[in-house]
Image: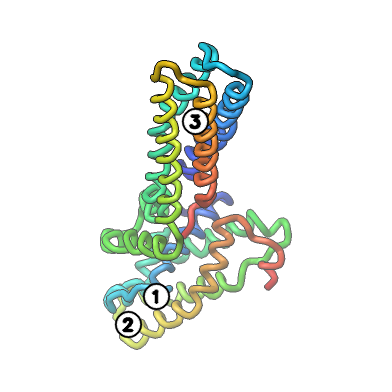
Amino acid sequence: MSQAKPDDLQHLARAVLIMLVPFEGQVALPVETMKRIACREYWDALGGVDRLCENLRRSFTAKYAGIGYRFPRELDALLAELGRLPSRNVIAGEQQIDDVCAHMKTQSSLVSETLRRLGESRYNQDDANS
Amino acid sequence: MSAWQHKRSRLNHDWLKNTFIIQLGALWNLTNSKSDADCDLVESCRDALEEWAEHRFESRELIEAFRTEESPKALFSIPPLSNCDEETRSWLPDYVHQHWLNTYPVKSWIQDALKTWEEADECASKLQTALNQPGRRADTLAALVNDLRHSVSALSDAVSRFPSRQLI
């Protein structure tokens, strides 16, 4: 996962989308599970948060920058959020984790839509600029 | 494109649309040009039934496999999601599978396609029975070939209605 190729964008976008599914909250998850997915370790499975962000940006740039698309702001917001998540080894206050969960829940539908477009290669200029 | 999508394309595009439905169309024209159920007509009907027999299990399996092979749960067997730890793998794959079932009409897609498959199989079976009858008539065969032609077209349409990409 350290050197994502442009073709990996779809895989990566779909993987992040799947990891976001629990935040859509269609089915109530146990509090402990919600706390767990609000930590960086949950996302590290995708190659480590730093590498995940780097690979998403790199593969997006390789695929779209040449034709004038800029990195979606929804993903920027998500990646910034992931960078601030507490590691599991760090004792984070319950309120902090609850806030992260609430925030992710709020923005996950926007991010999901963006990731869906990336995963489906149907991204277009209007979407990128909106 | 996933393995299931490749199999779907081979079955629906390469075989159903570009081979079998064309073969049945030609057979339908042949039945209409005959007043008697001669050897040529009977042989052509048998060829069509052999063609169906050769692919009937494959087509049913494809429909039934959609639920497992196109579920986002399947993505947990390949990177990067295969890197999830045991704790996450104990609940997230089933969770996203359930979410997928709740979000999309997966059961309807499968049930509708299986229904058309069963109708096509029944039409093929009736044609086989008619061929085995002594004194079979050309107009009887024509009607059965027409039923088979329509049911196979319906099967192809139902297989086409499955999504062309893996949905999450």
Looking at the rendered structure, the secondary structure element under dot 1 is loop
| Marks 2, 1: nearer the viewer | 1
Residue toward you, A82 or B112: B112
Residue at image point 45% right, 37% down: B120
Residue toward you, A119 or B31: B31
Which chain does the residue under circle 2 lie in?
Answer: A
So how many labels did they put on this image?
Answer: 3
Q: Are marks 2 and 1 in contact (CB under 8 Å)?
A: no
- For label 2, the residue is A92
- Tell me, yes or no, if residue B135 can be seen here: yes
Q: Label for residue A129?
A: none
Q: Position of residue B47 (x, y in %)?
A: 49, 19
Q: Amino acid at mark 1?
A: Gly
Residue at image point 58% right, 61% down: A117
- For label 3, the residue is B144
Q: Position of residue B62 (x, y in %)?
A: 42, 40
- For label 1, the residue is A25
Residue at image point 27% right, 76% down: A30
Which chain does the residue under circle 1 lie in?
Answer: A
Q: Pointer 2: residues within 10 angstroms few (<14), some, or many (20+)?
A: some
Mark 3 to mark 2: distance in Å?
71 Å
Q: Position of residue B157 (x, y in %)?
A: 54, 45
B14 to B95, vertically: above or below: above
Mark 2 to mark 1: distance in Å?
22 Å
Q: Which residue occupies the extreme top position in the image? A: B39
Looking at the rendered structure, the secondary structure element under dot 3 is helix
The colour scheme used here is: rainbow
Residue at image point 61% right, 24% down: B32
Q: Are marks 3 and 1 in contact (CB under 8 Å)?
A: no
Sequence order check: which comes first, mark 2 or mark 1? 1
Q: Amino acid at mark 2?
A: Ala
